Amino acid sequence: MSVFKIEDLRVSVDGHPILRGVNLEVRSGEVHALMGPNGSGKSTLAHALMGRSDYEVTGGSVTIDGEELLGLPTWQRAAKGLFLAMQYPVEVPGVRLDDMLAAARQARHAPVEDVPAHVAQEGQRLGVPVALLERGVNDEFSGGEKKRAETLQLAVLQPKFAVLDEIDSGLDVDALRDVARRVEAMTHEDNLGVLAITHYARLLTELRPDRVHVMLAGRVVQSGGPELADRLEVTGYEGIAAELGIEELIVETRVEADPFGDPTIGNSPFADPLA
Ligand code: ADP
Ligand code: MG
């Protein structure tokens, strides 16, 4: 049994604090859902966990079985058992999925001979046509195809923990069911621990969470059982915020210059810099 632990994680982007002390703990075989409105910091958490360089960690720790991941390059975090399915998967024309997965497994000293067979088998299980597998990774895939392909990567790489950033976005009901069921099966068969970031409770009817967490403005403000997701469907994030007396739901970072603003006030791009 492994433990993935996030403690008091603080992250800034361009000097703006976005995550303001996030605490979460996921164990092998568990599914945790992280829900929150757009702009609350969910993707920032996913990127920071995986070590994206423009996300500055200003405090806290992230460990798997007590081993610190912060400060490690992304590939080493992956080698230690962490996997991220991105909200917007990157297209990599010219690099085949099975070659990429073989390289990823090699970096973890895992066997590679069975990768093509494993990819074919998972492709069938997840409804990813062979023709897609012969293209570059995600190259001109539709939104739904990308999410199926991310799930296929997860199934072949067999990490200890997976962070799924809106794996349900852009999926029709059939694809959603296939993806959610595949992930759910991994939690039983491979003891995978999952942190599933989602807006919608509908993912959670197939991928049943043990715990549900609500993120508002860069913090986990409430945690509970699956019933919390149902309650959110009724009250919305505003309802939870009101109950807890929280005013800020999202993290405001981008201060846009107003092109129609009064130039004497100084927020217009046309303002005289010498005035
Ligand atoms: P969510 O995934 O919950 O919708 P995000 O983590 O994407 O939220 O964004 C949280 C806040 O951080 C938003 O205000 C967003 O504009 C800001 N933010 C995220 N990434 C960047 C970035 N690379 N540059 C500037 N601001 C960012
Ligand atoms: Mg997001």
Image: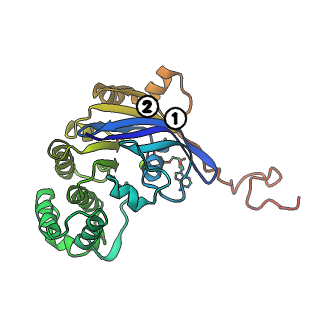
Q: Is residue 268 above or below residue 200?
A: below
Badge 2 crowding class, 10 Å Cα cut-off, few under 14, some 14 to 19, many 20 or more, is: some
Q: Is residue 199 left or right of residue 147?
A: right
User: Vertically, is 91 above or below 57?
Assistant: below
Q: Secondary structure at mark 1?
A: loop
Residue 237's disc number: 2
Q: Is residue 109 left or right of residue 60?
A: left
58 up-or-down from 142: above or below:
above
Quarter occupied by residue 20:
top right
* Residue situated in front as seen by the camera: 134 or 118: 118
x, y percent for residue 112:
19, 68
Q: Nearer the viewer, residue 240 or 222?
A: 222
Decide if ligand 1 comes within 8 Å of the CB at mark 1: no
Mark 1 and mark 2 lie on one chain; the one further toward the N terminus is 2
Q: Name the foreground residue: 53 vs 76.
A: 76
Q: x%, y% of residue 143?
A: 30, 60
Q: Amino acid at mark 2?
A: Tyr
Q: Residue at x 54, y 26 (%)?
A: 246
Residue for badge 1: 249
Q: Residues within 10 Å of mark 1 (few under 14, many from 20)?
A: many
Q: CA distance from mark 1 to mark 2?
A: 8 Å
Q: Amino acid at mark 1?
A: Leu
